[in-house]
Image (cartoon, rainbow, N blue to C red):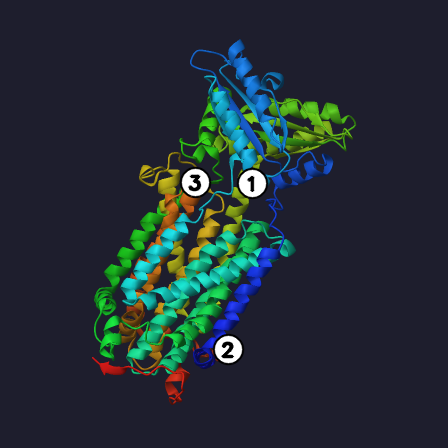
């Protein structure tokens, strides 16, 4: 592996114009394909195997066209204090507003609350439902402007008017601000780390090129592969993250080899052969983690994982080819200003912050290990009370009209009104389907925790009915989850008496089912990902204990990050500091995202840091000396990479959307714990205690495993064959210190 990548690095350096032109051609080709490709369609979220999805599929089958995923807006009208919306003047204002809401070109219908009887018992609140002909992402700006204008005109009459629903949910999310902040902080960190604008800019440039290639490819293939507009979100985030990291590792090793007196082309080859090997295997662990998302069984999540894995592969290829090629254009520009001015490169063989920290840990391995494990263990304890769900409008800031509409409906109609359950009755096996549906509705209506049941609506064939059930508790309340379980548990008795079957669906039931399925899939996902990564790390480090330590350390950091997420977003401690106005369950997909993304990044740091220790150990240093050598060469780079990732993820904390805020906080916390506590403290402490045993491998396993030579042992035995070339920059004079 090391020898092959060494040749790749030298070839890319020597044939830099060809390499640069090839990547430019690839970027242009996929960019042109993205421009010509039809727009990505809105992907219909589905989760096979859960009851909510089965019921939804049955509705689509029995009510063709009736369940089209058109955008909706629920406009809430609240009368001034002490008045009723049924008062003549207020009623006239509401009816006028509904007429205006229905005038939009994309509007299918706007239901008058006085005809639909959607008025609260005290008469203070009413709501109108506006249904659109197209999905939320297909709504034009003109339609949204028309909705907002109609609401503003209704407010002029003295009514309080708020609105919620999917029609207001434009393609929000982190609209680029978070990424810009993260890249800006990354530039500062790189500049401080390298002391050179070129060295700081090169990883950013190559990462942006990699993300451009990946995103353009996703857009170009979106129609053919059925990818949605959201598929590339994870690919962009991870492509930027690992793209900077991998280029940072290669550039850092190039500078190190130059400091040893290597000629530019030779240094580029050695950087690709050593740091490049670590990049390949670090990238493989990330790909394993992302491809493993298929275990969860959510098609959209599987596509996101595979698209992000493709972005990581592109980042690896760029680090191995384009980075050496760009170093060939400016071989001395990435060196420090002092080296460029003096014409002498100083080899940093003395102490630095990394060696001093390593010696501190080596002198006190047991206290450092105990402090790290106990500290992360304490932070992980709240994760035992993790409650999964899917926060909705109730989690948005009170400054948004969606949140105010949610609160107004809860006040006027009860907390369960915002999350009704939908019951689908299949009466094909019943003698009298209509009577069976009525009996089922009566039985469910008598269940404790049910406020009301709507009249059943039948399909044209008369064999399927649908009705709504309003719980007495909020959608994210644990009592609502228990109610859904109770209704389903009563099914066998009800079905035997009526001859008809029923299933429970709706947004609330769907979120409950998703949370349960994700929770059940978490252990198999961890088993697959961690198991495959341990096998990969066995090959890389040729050690039995180092991969086990890496996996256990990762689990500790992930559990600790989940614990702090629960403390802030579920329990509410410190929530105000982050702008979280409403606590509740943790987003269902959060643990899966956290495990997949952080596992990949954690293994990046593990491979790069420990591979330098392994390299030193293979070359004859003692276990303690190899730990110190690893930190001397890698600590600063790993710290810089971790700070960049923390900055990128922490930028999302400033977003108004609570789910994006939660993801950013969780990922930033996980990287902080894993990089600075696990990799920089627990890892050297464990290696210090294990000594030579850390690198022990049974002989039979050593013979069975393939040899990949990540540490570059073959390169160390190889005589230098740096041939002069006309296009190779003149070497700076090395100065040993």
Label 2 crowding class (10 Å Cα cut-off): few <14, some 14-19, many 20+?
few
What is the distance, in whole Å, between disc 1 and disc 2 at their CAs? 44 Å
* Towards the viewer: 129 or 660: 129
| Of callouts 1 and 2, the N-terminal one | 1
| Of callouts 2 and 3, the N-terminal one | 3
* 448 horizontally vs 395: left or right: right
Regarding residue 394, the answer to whether it shows in the image is: yes
Regarding residue 417, the answer to whether it shows in the image is: no
Which residue is under mark 1?
Answer: 513
Which residue is under mark 2?
Answer: 704
What is the distance, in whole Å, between disc 3 and disc 1 at their CAs? 23 Å
The number of numbered badges drawn on the structure is 3
Label 3 crowding class (10 Å Cα cut-off): few <14, some 14-19, many 20+?
some
Where residue 429 appears, as percent x and y from the top left, is 77, 33
Q: Secondary structure at mark 3?
A: loop
* Towards the viewer: 54 or 146: 146
Q: Residue at x 56, y 25 (%)?
A: 470
* 254 horizontally vs 46: left or right: left
Q: Is residue 425 above or below residue 616?
A: above
Label 1 crowding class (10 Å Cα cut-off): few <14, some 14-19, many 20+?
many
Which residue is under mark 3?
Answer: 657
Q: Secondary structure at mark 2?
A: helix
Where residue 28 appears, as percent x and y from the top left, is 54, 64
* Towards the viewer: 323 or 510: 323
């Amino acid at each position: 592996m090391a020898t092959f990548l060494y040749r790749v690095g030298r070839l890319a350096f020597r044939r830099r114009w060809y390499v640069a032109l090839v990547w430019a051609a690839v970027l242009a080709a996929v960019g042109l394909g993205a421009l010509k490709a039809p727009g990505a369609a809105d992907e219909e979220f589905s989760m096979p195997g859960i009851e909510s999805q089965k019921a939804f599929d049955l509705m689509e089958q029995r009510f063709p066209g009736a369940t089209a995923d058109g955008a909706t807006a629920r406009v809430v009208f609240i009368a001034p204090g002490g008045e009723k919306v049924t008062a003549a003047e207020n009623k006239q204002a509401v009816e006028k507003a509904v007429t205006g809401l229905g005038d939009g070109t994309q509007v299918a219908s706007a239901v008058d609350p006085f005809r639909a009887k959607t008025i609260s018992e005290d008469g203070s609140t009413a709501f109108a439902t506006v249904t659109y002909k197209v999905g939320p992402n297909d709504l034009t700006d003109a339609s949204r402007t028309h909705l907002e204008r109609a609401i503003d005109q209704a407010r002029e009459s003295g009514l309080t008017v708020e609105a919620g629903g999917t029609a207001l949910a434009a393609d929000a999310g982190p609209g680029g601000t978070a990424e810009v902040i993260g890249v800006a902080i990354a530039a500062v960190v790189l500049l401080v780390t390298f002391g050179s604008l070129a060295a700081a800019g090169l990883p950013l440039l190559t990462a942006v090129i990699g993300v451009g290639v990946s995103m353009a490819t996703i857009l170009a293939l979106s129609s053919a592969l059925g990818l949605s507009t959201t598929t590339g979100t994870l690919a962009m985030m991870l492509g930027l993250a690992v793209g900077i990291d991998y280029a940072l590792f290669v550039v850092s090793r190039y500078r190190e080899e130059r400091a040893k007196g290597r000629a530019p082309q030779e240094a580029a080859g050695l950087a690709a052969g050593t740091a490049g090997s670590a990049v390949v295997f670090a990238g493989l662990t990330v790909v394993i983690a992302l491809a493993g998302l298929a275990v969860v069984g959510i098609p959209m999540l599987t596509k996101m994982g595979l698209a992000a894995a493709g972005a990581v592969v592109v980042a690896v290829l760029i680090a191995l080819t384009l980075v050496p090629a760009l170093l060939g254009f400016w071989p001395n520009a990435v060196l420090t200003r002092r080296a460029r001015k003096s014409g002498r490169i100083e080899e940093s063989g003395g102490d630095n912050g990394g060696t001093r920290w390593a010696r501190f840990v080596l002198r006190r391995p047991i206290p450092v290990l105990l402090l790290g494990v106990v500290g992360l263990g304490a932070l992980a304890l709240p994760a035992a009370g993790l409650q999964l769900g899917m926060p909705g409008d109730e989690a948005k800031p009170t400054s948004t009209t969606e949140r105010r509409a949610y609160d107004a409906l809860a006040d006027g109609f009860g907390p369960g009104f915002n999350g009704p359950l939908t019951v689908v009755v299949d009466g094909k096996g019943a003698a009298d389907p209509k009577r069976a549906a009525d009996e089922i509705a009566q039985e469910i209506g008598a269940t404790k925790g049910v406020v009301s049941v709507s009249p059943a609506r039948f399909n044209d064939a008369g064999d399927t009915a649908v009705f709504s059930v309003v719980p007495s508790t909020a959608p994210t309340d644990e009592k609502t989850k228990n109610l859904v379980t109770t209704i389903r548990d009563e099914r066998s008795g009800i079905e035997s008496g009526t001859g008809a079957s029923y299933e429970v669906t709706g947004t609330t039931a769907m979120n409950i089912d998703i949370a349960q399925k994700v929770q059940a899939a978490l252990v198999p996902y961890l088993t697959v990902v961690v198991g495959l990564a341990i096998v990969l790390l066995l090959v890389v480090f040729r050690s039995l204990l180092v991969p086990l330590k890496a996996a256990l350390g990762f689990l500790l950091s992930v559990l600790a990050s989940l614990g702090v997420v629960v403390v802030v977003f579920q329990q509410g401690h410190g929530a105000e500091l982050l702008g979280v106005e409403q606590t509740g369950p943790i987003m269902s997909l959060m643990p899966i995202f956290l495990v997949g993304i952080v596992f990949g990044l954690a293994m990046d740091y593990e491979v790069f840091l420990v591979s330098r220790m392994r390299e030193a150990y293979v070359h004859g240093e003692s276990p303690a000396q190899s730990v110190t050598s690893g930190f001397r060469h890698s600590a600063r780079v790993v710290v810089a990479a971790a700070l960049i990732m923390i900055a990128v993820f922490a930028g999302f904390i400033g977003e108004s959307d609570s789910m994006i805020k939660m993801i950013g906080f969780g990922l930033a916390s996980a990287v902080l714990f894993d990089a600075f506590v696990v990799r920089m403290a627990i890892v050297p402490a464990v290696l210090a205690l294990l000594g030579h045993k850390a690198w022990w491998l049974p002989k039979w396993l050593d013979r069975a495993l393939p040899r990949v030579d990540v540490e570059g042992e073959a390169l160390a035995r190889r005589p230098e064959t740096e041939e002069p070339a006309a296009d190779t920059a003149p070497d700076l004079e090395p100065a040993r210190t």
